[in-house]
Image (tube, rainbow, N blue to C red):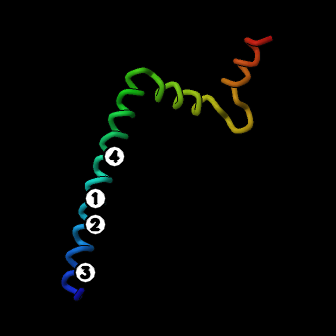
Amino acid sequence: MDDGERYKEAEESLTSLQLDLAQILSVMMEVMVLLSGEGWLTDTVANRRENDGSTWRSRDRVAGQRR
């Protein structure tokens, strides 16, 4: 196998990997859109904003509801 064949094979492999990555990213974007539509992402962001350092208000609120 000469360098030209190796180069062509490597180029085809890279193109295949790029297509796989594009498909994975597409699916991830669809999942994010679906989760945001269900409120999962916005709830997570709101909980993170609610956390101020060592105080986890959302966890404390849940713990208070259990009592």
Three-letter amino acid code at disc 2? Leu
Three-letter amino acid code at disc 4? Leu
**Which x, y percent locates residue 27?**
33, 39
The mark nearer the N terminus, 1 or 3, is: 3
Label 4 – label 2 distance at C-alpha? 16 Å
Q: Which residue is mark 3?
A: 6
Tag nearer the camera, 3 or 2: 3
Of residues 22 and 46, the one nearer the viewer is 22
SS class, disc 1: helix
Q: Are marks 4 and 1 in contact (CB under 8 Å)?
A: no
Three-letter amino acid code at disc 3? Arg
Of residues 48 and 11, the one nearer the viewer is 11
Q: Which residue is mark 2?
A: 14
Of residues 40 and 60, the one nearer the viewer is 40
The mark nearer the N terminus, 4 or 2, is: 2
* Residue at 66 percent of width and 23 percent of height: 58
SS class, disc 4: helix
The mark nearer the N terminus, 4 or 1, is: 1
The mark nearer the N terminus, 3 or 2, is: 3
Q: Is residue 18 left or right of residue 35?
A: left
Tag nearer the camera, 4 or 3: 3
